[in-house]
Image (cartoon, rainbow, N blue to C red):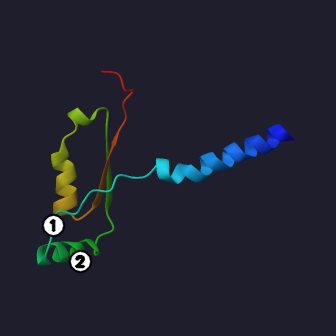
């Protein structure tokens, strides 16, 4: 019974702290003023999303991501899949 209570306590602590550990990176907004407002209003008209995947962040071509984000007003993300070895 004691082991079961301890396991429930540990599980509760792990699940409770998980949202703080796995928090998405939020970039600061650099655009200010009326131009930023205009861009944000234009982005409301599109529902496009682009996920660009790559084997290593050094090998990715950010021009494609920038084109879709800036020119096409799409939501963009880059997913890097590495094993962590040099």
Q: Is residue 76 above or below residue 36?
A: above
Q: Residues within 10 Å of mark 1 (few under 14, many from 20)?
A: few
Q: Nearer the viewer, residue 2 or 49?
A: 2
Residue occupying the point 31% across, 32% down: 55
Q: Is residue 80 left or right of residue 39?
A: right
Quadrant of res 11: top right
Give the residue pinned by disc 1.
Answer: 31
Q: Residue at x 13, y 75 (%)?
A: 33
Compare marks 2 and 1 and give the one earlier in the sequence.
Answer: 1
Mark 1 residue element:
loop
Residue at image location 37% in from the left, 26% down from the top = 84
Q: Residues within 10 Å of mark 2 (few under 14, many from 20)?
A: few
Number of dots carrying numbers: 2
- Residue at which label 2 appears: 41
User: Spatial distance from mark 2 to mark 1, Cα to Cα?
Assistant: 13 Å
Q: Which residue appears at 29% of the width and 70% of the height? A: 46
- Up the image or down, 41 lies above or below 2; here it is below
Image position, residue 2 (x, y; %): 84, 40
């Amino acid at each position: 019974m004691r082991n079961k209570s301890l396991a429930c306590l540990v599980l509760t602590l792990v699940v409770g702290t998980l949202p703080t550990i796995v928090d998405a990176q939020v970039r600061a907004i650099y655009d200010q003023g009326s131009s930023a407002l205009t861009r944000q209003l234009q982005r409301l008209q599109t529902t496009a999303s682009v996920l660009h995947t790559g084997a290593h962040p050094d090998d990715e071509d950010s021009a494609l991501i920038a084109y879709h984000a800036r020119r096409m007003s799409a939501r963009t993300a880059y997913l890097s899949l590495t094993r962590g070895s040099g």
